[in-house]
Amino acid sequence: MNLKNSFSLLLLAALWGASFLFIRVGVAEFGPAPLVALRVSTAALVLLGVLAAQLGLQGFRDLRKHAAQLLIVGVLNTAAPFCLFAIAEQTLNAGLTSVINATTPLWGALVAFVWLKNSLSPSRVAGMVIGMVGVLALVWYQIAMPSSNPGASTPLQSVLAVAAGLGATLLYGIGANYTKHVLSGVPPLVIATGSMLGASLATLPFALVSWPSVAVSGRAWGAVITMGVACTALAYMLFFRLISHAGPAAAMSVAFLIPLFGILWGTLFLAEPLSPALAGGVVLVLAGTALATGLLQKMWLRFTPSAQI
């Protein structure tokens, strides 16, 4: 990966890591559905402009041709998981939620095994087990240190919040495999734009019903708009550029960097605490994910001298 692609990868991780910070700031005043509706509709407007500039009328023809599938992707891969993460962050802090997000490749591998009959080696199964042990360690950290998360009042709330986060990453895994199965060959920009439009349609009714009854602060508005433009529209464009220029494997490695930035932003701007227990859970989740996705095996083959013969 060259210097430009490496910088793009770091920027993408910083943006997606920051989304958990902005969710934490905005959800307290907007609530989950309005926050997500504003986020995805803002991103959809930006992406529509980019689509028109880059693909012209053909891009809109592709949107219409694949409208049904894009609506499903918008629900599975955007609207529902975004809402679940927003619900989770009413209890969990931003850094912890960003670590849970790193389990997405675990679910992706499991869904591919169950649905698409992809094989799972013993090492990948072991990676899934290690990753889930890491999640359990984070759940224990959340329950044992309620003072680190003012929204958490009971252990049950903490467990349900973690379950919501894991539900979001499971949906990401289903959405990614569904996208690969039914939208292979469709331009990535069309998929990104269509999924945001589908997510906007899906969340709008819920947003209208649950719109805040009191005025929302400028801070919360700023968080949601910034999240829509930078952490969603711009981030998706960076992600698909990385896929095009560096390959899917390099682009997906962003999952290992997002928790680092999520924890960093939460510590710097929300004064979220750090602890050895949190660090241990992070290591287990990332190590398990790397093993389950085959990344550790590929690195071993790459750097082992005998593999170069």
Image (tube, grey):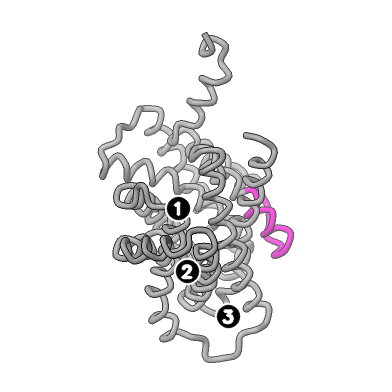
Q: Nearer the viewer, mark 1 or mark 3?
A: 1
Residue stretch in magenta: 260-275
Q: Which residue position holds label 3?
A: 29
Circle 1: residue type = Pro
Please state which of residues 18 and 159 is positioned toward the viewer in this rendering.
Answer: 18
Q: Which residue position holds label 1?
A: 188
Residue neighbourhood size for the residue with mark 2, other residues' Cα within 10 Å, grouped as few (<14), some (14–19), many (≥20): many
* Relative image position of residue 302 (x, y in whole percent): 55, 21
Q: Secondary structure at mark 3?
A: helix
Please state which of residues 58 and 34 is positioned toward the viewer in this rendering.
Answer: 58
* Relative image position of residue 127 (x, y in whole percent): 44, 35
Q: Is residue 308 above or below residue 117?
A: above
Q: Residue at x 43, y 73 (%)?
A: 200
Can the viewer see residue 155 in this picture?
A: no
- Secondary structure, magenta segment, majority class: helix
Q: Secondary structure at mark 2?
A: helix
Q: Residue at x 65, y 45 (%)?
A: 276
Labels 3 and 2 touching (C-beta < 8 A) = no
Q: Is residue 19 above or below residue 3?
A: below
